Amino acid sequence: MAQMLVPSMQCSQMRVPGNLVQTRSLMPPRMWKSLLLNHQNPKTKKGLSSFRVFAMKSESSNGTVARLEDLLNMDITPFTDKIIAEYIWIGGTGIDIRSKSRTISKPVEHPSELPKWNYDGSSTGQAPGEDSEVILYPQAIFKDPFRGGNNILVICDSYTPSGEPIPTNKRHRAAQIFSDKKVIDEVPWYGIEQEYTLLQQNVKWPLGWPVGGYPGPQGPYYCAAGADKSFGRDISDAHYKACLYAGINISGTNGEVMPGQWEYQVGPSVGIDAADHIWCSRYILERITEQAGVVLSLDPKPIEGDWNGAGCHTNYSTKSMREEGGYNLIKKAILNLSLRHKEHISAYGEGNERRLTGKHETASIDSFSWGVANRGCSIRVGRDTEKQGKGYLEDRRPASNMDPYVVTSLLAETTILWEPTLEAEALAAKKLQLQV
């Protein structure tokens, strides 16, 4: 877990050299040509689009591949003011990501400049066939690392034609919480650690694992290097650079405890931006794994047995927690979180009961706990926070498939807006041995 103490500047104006080394065939991870950016042509305006067309394998198709790559890499900026906007939204499962493209007449700088759009909600499990139109409201824009130029990715949320948020639109409620004056005044920061697992496409088994078999026990894989310990590094690195190019506030990445599993961190980000950035980063990761012929899994326990699950630990602080004397406010927040443990667990991701077992660096899903530097607790407080008397807390309960709109807004609601009774607070403090 990376410490996230000071918010980074937004990266929306960053320019990253665009050419990637050409990769013409789908190969095992250890044999892949690098997906890193080509620094030999720093003036290029291409995005990350040149690591494409993995599916074309035969030597006889090389000419076709080259022509497709030429078109995919084409910079249209000198020829037209028009741009391509990829509208992205969350599908009916609450975790699947959908998108489609449209032409915009000129470059834009704010989502308010973009038109609303619609899609067939009956094909995403979000509307009946006889009344299937769902309306997309643009909410956040990022630079498109796949098309480059002035092209953009657009994070949207979904509404009925009458303007009501549909049930799977969790952003709407989050925006209401983050627009509350009490929440605005506390400037909530989030640092989110997104874990994920890479699976072999045809067998849905972790990348680098023998098909139908298991690698050696956990231990040598965390943050490791080497062809027998690290599987999928090119995907992680390509994703890292694509996020920086897009303007996502990504702050780091590392290999995880289970082989074939990775993590990246987004933040610190303020309020609803944290969730917008996570959703866009997930979309970019889906696109990169699609091109690499690898399956992305956000299952919180992809492999049963003595293997770590996948979480989405959420580091959180308010302005009051970051100021002198903030440790008392952190402990007060922990009290509130303990009293709403069931509400949080029910909103922290599907299948989380398979992960939160009290083993593999987790707390039991049935009980609430906290501790300093203890990764087996529900809430962890860092040594530096304890020493300095201010800082942040880490909620280790969210699953890898959690909805960041739900988790970030619920943390703000519970710790800033919600007030328990004095009796309930006293009982919780006694149980948790907290002096507030």
Image (spheres, helix red, strand yellow):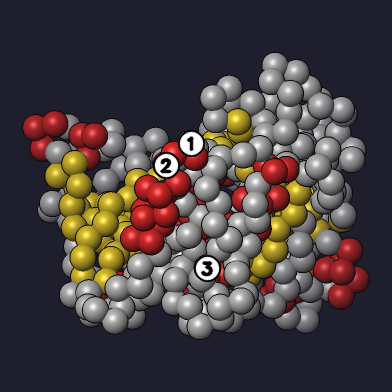
Question: What residue lies at 49% left-to-right and 44% top-to-bottom?
Answer: 54
Residue closest to the eye, 431 or 243 = 243
Q: Is residue 323 something that shows in the picture?
A: yes
Mark 1 and mark 3 in contact? Answer it, CB < 8 Å. no
Asked if labels 1 and 2 touch by Cβ distance under 8 angstroms, the answer is: yes
Q: Residue furthest top?
A: 212
Amino acid, disc 1: Ser
Q: Is residue 435 above or below residue 358?
A: below
Q: Earlier in the sequence, mark 1 or mark 3?
A: 3
Toward which corner of the image does residue 264 lie, by quadrant?
A: bottom right
Q: Give the numbered dot on residue 361.
A: none
Q: Nearer the viewer, residue 140 or 364?
A: 140
The image position of residue 44, as x and y in percent, is: 48, 78
Q: Nearer the viewer, residue 420 or 422?
A: 420
The residue identified by callout 1 is 58
Residue at horizontal 45%, vertical 60%? 49
**Could you tell me if residue 429 is visible in this image?**
no
Q: Secondary structure at mark 1?
A: loop
* Viewer-nearest of discs 1 and 3: 1
Residue depicted at x 84% and y 46%: 226
- Tell me the quarter of the image containing the C terminus: bottom right
As measured in the structure, the alpha-carbon distance from the residue carrying label 2 to the one carrying label 1 is: 6 Å
Report the disc number at residue 61.
2
Residue mark closest to the camera, 2 vs 3 = 2
Residue corresponding to mark 3: 19
Q: Position of residue 371 (x, y in %)?
A: 84, 51
Which of the 4 image quarters holds residue 393?
bottom right
Work out whether residue 403 or residue 301 is closer to the camera in this orientation and state it: 301
Quick one: label 2 or label 3, which is nearer the N terminus? 3
Helix, strand or loop status at disc 2: helix
